[in-house]
Amino acid sequence: MLDRAEAIFNIINTMDEPFTKTTLTKANISPKAASNWLDLIVFIQDQPKIRVTKTKRNTIVEKIGGRFSQMSLQFFLDDSQPIDKRLQSLEAYASSILVTERLSKSENQ
């Protein structure tokens, strides 16, 4: 799966203009599989960010930010919104992530 995702993103990263999903056949996947992969990618991009930490015995998954952070990021990414509002939203997102990290670090000490 990782190899397939890397192949898809290699194609996406080389494209400067919008393209049809059939372009993804260069990654040796069918148009139906390309649709499924694109649906999965869009779904994942709409989810909260996570941090994965691997230790010798465990893999720890940590959600980064809360609801406010996610809403701020989604608003920033919405290109139908005015740029000044999007920039304010990005500042709010960054502040909320930093505050969350500081609180987390102070709790762990």
Image: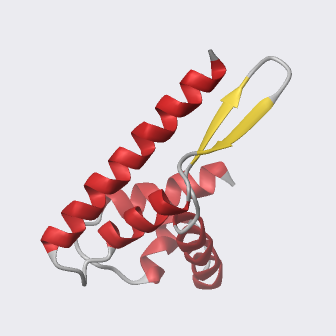
Q: Look at the picture and state if 65 lies above or below 55.
A: below
Quarter of the image for the C terminus: give it: top right
18 and 102: which one is in front?
A: 102
Quarter of the image for the N terminus: give it: bottom right
The residue at 66%/41% (across/down) is: 62
Spot occupied by residue 86 in the image (x, y as percentages of width and height): 23, 68
28 and 96: which one is in front?
A: 96
Q: Look at the picture and state if 95 lies above or below 18.
A: above
Spot occupied by residue 7 in the image (x, y as percentages of width and height): 51, 56
Spot occupied by residue 54 in the image (x, y as percentages of width and height): 71, 26
10 and 57: which one is in front?
A: 57
The residue at 62%/71% (across/down) is: 40
Q: Locate residue 8 relative to residue 14 in the image: left or right.
A: right
- Rendered image quadrant of residue 18: bottom left
* Tally of numbered tags: 0
The residue at 41%/48% (across/down) is: 96
Spot occupied by residue 50 in the image (x, y as percentages of width and height): 60, 47
Q: How is the image coloured?
A: secondary structure
Q: Locate residue 60 relative to residue 62 in the image: left or right.
A: right
- Rendered image quadrant of residue 61: top right
